Image: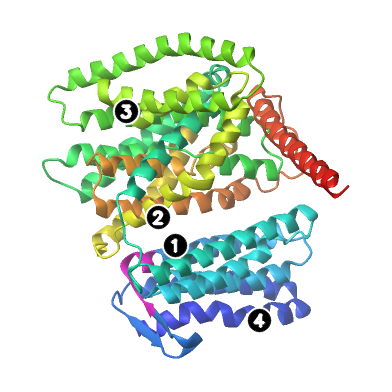
Amino acid sequence: MGNILLLFLVLFPMLLSAWVFPLRRRDRRYRNWLIQIIPAVELAAALLLLLWPGAALELPGVFGFGLRLQAGSLGSLLALVSAFLWAATGLNCPSYFAAAEGCNRFYFFWLLTLGALMGVFLAADLFTLFVFFEMMSFTSYVWVVQNETEEARQAGQTYLAVAVIGGMALLAGLLLGPAMLGVLQETTLMDQLAELGVIVLMFNAGLETDLGELKRSGKAAFVIAFIGVLVPLAGGFALAAAFNRGPDAFLQNVFIGVVLTATSVSITVETLKEIGRLSTRSGSAILGAAIIDDVLGIIGLTVITSLGGGGANVWVVLGKIAAFFAVSVVVWMVMHRFVDWWFRRYSRDKRRFVVLSFAFCLLYSFFAEAVFGVADITGAYIAGLIFANTCRVAYLQDRFDTLSYALLSPIFFASIGLKVVLPEMSTTILLFAVLLVLWAVVSKVVGCGLGAKLCRYSNQDALRIGVGMISRGEVALIVANNGIAAGLMKEEFFGPVVLMVIATTILTPVLLKLVYRGKEHDYSDLQESELVNAYEDAAAFDLASQALLEDHENLKQSARKK
């Protein structure tokens, strides 16, 4: 039975995708039912697969090497989550594409992608993973170019190029890695570069934090953020305590709560911009609360990692933390003014600014950990705050984004994947993962929604604010990675945390569009917001800078041709 389920999960959505077009010609309702029923059946099959954890299937001779599928612990769980997300999306698709053109094509490739994704998660070897990953890359390409605008085509070309390059890199890893030739072996270099990548990511986060915006966020944003941090923290601790007991379990369980406090609002902001709801009262509250949420999360991480560092006296540790933040305030007051004055004085050879800021970031990270016992990423974040709001901050962000996204961040996220423990994911851990995902969603909705109600928001706006704060993202991964390094998180808990991040990131846009349904032409709650204006001005500046760079390159190429 398990073998049949493996084959069914991969082939069922692929085979039935062909029915999208003939059903559309008969009646649109039949097509809409189809794209809702197929993921629901897929979800039921994924649930049944959990009953056969050792199921395996081999299809010899396919693509020359054969394909192998296996029901692993984490793979089966990811397949279940994927089916759930497709089912949730299928419920929203008919209304979303009600007036859209080419939706049949989208549904066709949408179902093909579901089958390919099942193959990725249930793959028993790297070759099978490679085949289904490439299939998923090409089928999901249609999603990117769905609107057929010039911007969509350009984005599709970029996406396809990245996907092909990623597939070739995966194939190279398959051939050169331990699985086949064994030319490349794991070393400590990746861990060291990953740690440097975390520092740069947190420095970037500090650069993007506007203390002026933090002041303008107001009391409501603070209340929403505070309760939105407190509820996940308490609930995460209680959930972890039910699965983890022992002499060292207290701080480990508290740390799970700290992981749940983090919010990555970038996806929420882009979704609200897409549906035209960013400038609403609820959208402004989400943006303001997210800024405060980051600061509270950093403070929580600092406290728990310092307490877990082997300090004999809690009050001594707390005193060191307080001393660190007091020193940081003084350093910020002095360095911020000096840096801003120095940046304004020199307008040429701005590369020296990057060298100075990076050197200061590394020194302050070392200073935080070596002197005060505070996590190095906290020092990096504070260093970013010092350089934020200076006259050259946009230039610094551009340079560090290039360094981060081109080299350090991919290595960091790759190291995250390597740390996920697959074999040890027992039935207990699977249950913990499911409950963790559910609590990650519910806690933000309840916590932030309660804070919004205390600030006299309507029930509808409170729900929207809570949903907008669900997404975790890279912040939670950074916190979790730091916890593993500090011995505050069990390795078997890391897989559920990664799963929680993926699930909340995907669920947030879907849920946001559901809670804002029916507001497409309602502009009664639009309002002027300095936070939103600052965000949109920054985005417009980035687009203008990119356009100027492209024009400059075009002029250079034209001059060379002449």
Name the residue carrying label 4: 18
Judge the density around disc 2: few (<14), some (14-19), many (≥20) Cα neighbours within 10 Å.
many
From the top left corner, tell me how far across and down residue 164 is, in percent: 58, 65
* Residue in view at x 56 percent, y 73 percent: 135
How many labels sit on residues? 4
Regarding residue 40, the answer to whether it shows in the image is: no
Question: What is the C-alpha distance between the residues marked 1 and 3?
Answer: 32 Å
Q: Earlier in the sequence, mark 4 or mark 2?
A: 4
Query: Which of labels 2 and 3 is toward the front?
Result: 3
Magenta stretch bounds: 69-77
| Quadrant location, the N terminus | bottom left
Q: Looking at numbered disc 2 in the image, what kind of residue is underneath it? A: Leu
* Horizontal side, residue 203 vs residue 240: left or right: right
Between disc 3 and disc 4, the foreground one is 3
* Residue 407 x, y percent position in the rendering: 49, 46
Whichever of callouts 2 and 3 sits on the residue coming sooner in the sequence is 3
Among the 4 quarters of the image, the one containing residue 274: top right
Q: CA distance from mark 2 to mark 3?
A: 24 Å
